[in-house]
Image: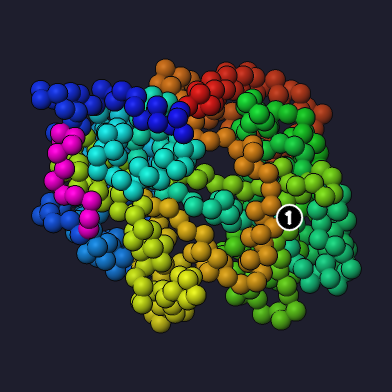
């Protein structure tokens, strides 16, 4: 906590200068001269502009976020008028770059600032967004309290220079960071007298039984990303990307464990245990395979995976369960598993903001007690009721009379369907994934040690950003190309050493050094 408070006292960046009165100013606002106070609704005629990518689920109910009931209710509760500007998710980066190049900025931008060239520190230096340290102190008591109580999460929204740059969406429970894994036909296991597989050896027994005794033509059907992004690599002590053990950064695809993983996947491919179309299949296809009996295990999420299977299945005897991430030895806790970043693309205030205090107070509302309940559950008496102290969604969300899915209804009436500035409540997902099968899968997939090894968001210095981007992109493309070749056998696994040498030629050692320096800087915070 002492280290955290010291960081709050660090000097502001170049965007922060001392006014002639001696008071600190950010942009045109003199810190300390609050106009609005800490209570809501705020009385102001100023209309803010907020640039944020358009979530596909919004378009089901409205063409603009501002037209949704949740946006209108937010305006009522805060008193802040907002005009929302939407690029689509498919062209958000292109539209963002065009906006930056134009020099015309809105008041607030929600974006993945880690992807800005040079990171958020460079965005501050370039005069795009403001450092928020003094603004948080002066105008955001709720966000300030959250950061003080959660210094590790606060560090995710702070540059190496100590400047806060955004108000993020945080997951208020570790379980919210995991929502996907491998789904297996539990009824097949029961029928064949097999236990739930935990190790690679047990998985081989199960997959062979699915092929030989159930006639599965693709016993294990995984999308390309699932094969490459760690559905089974953890059993070999690696991931397919960067991770850390202790204070040291590693790159899984150049390590011996990755070679063992490739050898196993190649063997499964040759034996017909792995979907022969793994490199081209998609989620819709593997779901269809699972429903029609071609597949006995697939990757999927709580809603779009298990939830979709249960909803679409016409086989009353079919049972689906979440399988644990595989381990090297039986009884071990899986080393890796799905673990998404705690902070998602989040809101920053631009240097052209017409009312910085108003923007800061709008963002701060999501971290208040009232904002927390509203953002997560909507309006009491309409979208949820308190039942024995538990915020329970009504049928407007769970069984929407207009035929909206639960996800679409939440997007319409709460903030949980999109990325906003608040702390997500685990009780939302407990209801969204409320089926017994989903609850079992969720509990199973969360049982990993991934949090010990996953790297936090790291900021690459500007003088290294170009080299890092160029080399890491080339390395990623080469790894993706080669792992398909190794698994299918078009490239013999005996050439793995040559593959590692090529990674080094592409600059993996330089990239690892840059990553290590960035991680060292993070640890010093």
Q: Identify the secondary structure beneath mark 1.
A: loop
User: Magenta segment, principal secondary structure?
Assistant: loop
Q: Position of residue 337 (x, y in %)?
A: 66, 47
Q: Position of residue 240 (x, y in %)?
A: 66, 37
Residue 76: image quadrant is bottom left
Residue 70: image quadrant is bottom left
Q: Which residues are magenta?
A: 29-40
Determine whether, in the image, residue 472 is placed left or right of residue 136: right
Q: Position of residue 496 (x, y in %)?
A: 76, 28
Residue 199 inside the magenta-drawn segment: no
Task: Mark yes or no: residue 72 visible.
Answer: yes
Residue, disc 1: 324
- The extreme front residue here reads 2
In the image, residue 488 sits, relative to residue 43, either above or below, namely above
The residue shown at (27%, 62%) is 74
Residue 251: image quadrant is top right
The residue shown at (20%, 41%) is 356
Is residue 40 or residue 177 the one in the foreground? 40
């Amino acid at each position: 906590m002492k280290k955290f408070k010291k960081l709050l006292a660090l000097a502001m960046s170049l965007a922060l200068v001392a006014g002639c009165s001696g008071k600190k100013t950010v942009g045109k606002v003199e810190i300390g001269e609050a106009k609005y106070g800490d209570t809501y609704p705020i009385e102001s005629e100023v209309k803010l502009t907020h640039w944020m990518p358009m979530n596909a689920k919004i378009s089901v109910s409205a063409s603009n976020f501002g037209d949704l009931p949740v946006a209108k209710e937010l305006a009522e509760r805060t008193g802040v008028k907002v005009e929302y500007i939407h690029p689509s998710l498919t062209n958000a980066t292109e539209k963002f770059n065009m906006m930056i190049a134009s020099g015309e900025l809105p008041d607030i931008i929600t974006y993945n600032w880690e992807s800005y060239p040079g990171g958020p520190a460079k965005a501050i230096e370039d005069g795009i967004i403001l450092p928020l340290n003094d603004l948080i102190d002066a105008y955001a008591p709720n966000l300030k309290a959250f950061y003080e109580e959660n210094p590790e999460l606060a560090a995710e929204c702070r540059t190496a220079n100590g400047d806060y740059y955004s108000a993020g969406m945080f997951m208020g429970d570790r379980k919210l960071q995991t929502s996907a894994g491998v789904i297996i036909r539990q009824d097949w296991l029961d029928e064949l007298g097999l236990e739930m597989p935990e190790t690679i050896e047990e998985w081989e027994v199960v997959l062979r039984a699915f092929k030989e005794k159930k006639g599965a033509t693709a016993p294990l059907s995984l999308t390309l990303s699932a094969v490459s992004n760690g559905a089974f690599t953890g059993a070999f002590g690696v991931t397919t990307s960067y991770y850390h053990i202790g204070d040291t950064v590693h790159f899984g695809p150049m390590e011996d464990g990755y070679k063992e993983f490739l050898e196993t996947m190649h063997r499964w491919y040759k034996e017909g245990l792995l979907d022969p179309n793994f490199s081209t299949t998609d989620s819709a296809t593997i779901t269809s395979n699972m429903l029609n009996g071609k597949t006995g295990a697939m990757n999927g999420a709580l809603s779009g995976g298990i939830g979709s299977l249960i909803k679409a299945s016409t086989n009353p005897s079919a049972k689906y369960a979440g399988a644990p991430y595989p381990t090297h030895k039986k009884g071990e806790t899986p080393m890796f598993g799905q673990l998404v970043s705690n902070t998602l693309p989040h809101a920053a205030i631009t240097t052209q903001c017409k009312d910085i205090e108003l923007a800061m107070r709008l963002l701060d509302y999501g971290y208040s007690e009232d904002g927390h309940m509203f953002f997560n559950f909507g309006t009491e008496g309409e979208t949820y009721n308190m039942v024995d102290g538990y915020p329970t969604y009504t049928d407007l969300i769970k069984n929407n009379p207009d035929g909206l899915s639960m996800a679409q209804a939440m997007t319409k009436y709460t903030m949980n369907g999109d990325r906003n500035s608040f702390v997500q409540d685990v009780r939302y997902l407990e209801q969204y994934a409320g089926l017994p099968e989903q609850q079992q899968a969720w509990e199973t997939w969360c049982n990993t040690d991934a949090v010990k090894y996953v790297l936090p968001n790291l900021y690459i210095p500007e003088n290294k950003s170009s080299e890092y981007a160029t080399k890491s992109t080339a390395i990623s493309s080469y790894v993706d190309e080669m792992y398909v070749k190794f698994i299918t056998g078009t490239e013999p696994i005996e050439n793995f050493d040559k593959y590692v040498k090529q990674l080094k030629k592409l600059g993996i050692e330089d990239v690892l050094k840059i990553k290590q320096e960035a991680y060292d800087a993070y640890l010093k915070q």
